[in-house]
Amino acid sequence: AFDRVAARFDELHIGDGLPCVPPTAARFARMREYCPFDPAEVIMQGIGPSGAPVTVRDVLIASVMAGCKPEYLPVVIGAVEVITREAFNLGGVQCTMHGVAPLLIVNGPYAKQIGLHGGNGCFGPGFRANTSVGRAIRLLLLNVGDGIPGGSSATIFSSPIRYSACLTENSELSPWPSLAESRGHKADDNVISAVMVEAPRLHFDDVSTEPERLLRGIADSMTSTGSWHMWF
């Protein structure tokens, strides 16, 4: 049965190219246990470039298909509310020739409770919460927002980061306040921040012995050819 569903999804161009979990009635019901909202409720009136409304039902189905555990659902719903704000310019990013993707940075005790990872290898693979939450957002952008490569999406090469991009911060080992705290939230607030990013770049220096030299190398890398910061 799973193979038949996967083949049918391929025929309908539903999904991200990886096998999706079939959204059966039983799985949908289990996901609803973490959802206090009516499935017909509209979270956002339009998601670019299709302009289709995003309903709670859409989010439930995408979360099941992505492999989310039910307890991940509040993060997925919160992320949808963040990335569909006008200031985020989701329509432009959906249609861009670039390969950028929405990165979700989740702060607060709930991130730790559901197992979001912010340490070594946090961009994956290997961490179900990180991968499936980010994947649920991508499935919504594809199937509801119509951000289909070669169609509405003009991205030239795209990027693996467009499969999934979700993490938390390694707050236990960080000497700095979290991103959420730096933006005025309390340490125990559950906060989702979203930013459009390119794929991660490694800034590596095992020669410098002084912080000033190390910082110069990092700053130089940030202004490398092709950087949007450099162009603007």
Image: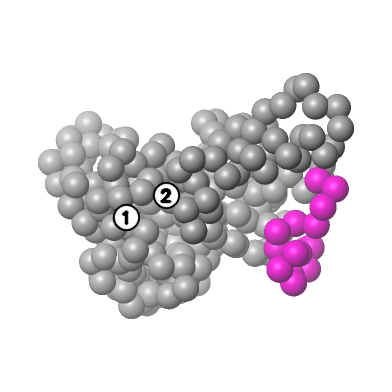
Q: Give the residues in magenta.
A: 174-188
Examine the rendering and report whether any part of residue 186 can be seen. Answer: yes
Label 1 sits on what residue type? Thr
Q: Does the residue at mark 1 contact the one at mark 2 (Cβ under 8 Å)?
A: yes
Q: How is the image coloured?
A: one colour
Residue 139 position (above or below residue 157): below
Task: State whether residue 48 is above or below residue 68.
Answer: below
Is residue 30 visible from the viewing direction of this image?
A: no
Q: Which one is in front, 92 or 24?
A: 92
Q: Provide the major secondary structure of the magenta segment.
A: loop
The residue singled out by tag 1 in the image is 96
Q: Position of residue 122 (x, y in %)?
A: 61, 37
Who's the residue at 34% across and 63% down the image?
92
- In the picture of the structure, the residue carrying the numbered disc 2 is 100
Tally of numbered discs: 2
Between marks 1 and 2, how big is the CA–CA gap? 8 Å
Residue under the image location 38 percent in, 64 percent down:
90
Q: Is residue 96 left or right of residue 76?
A: left
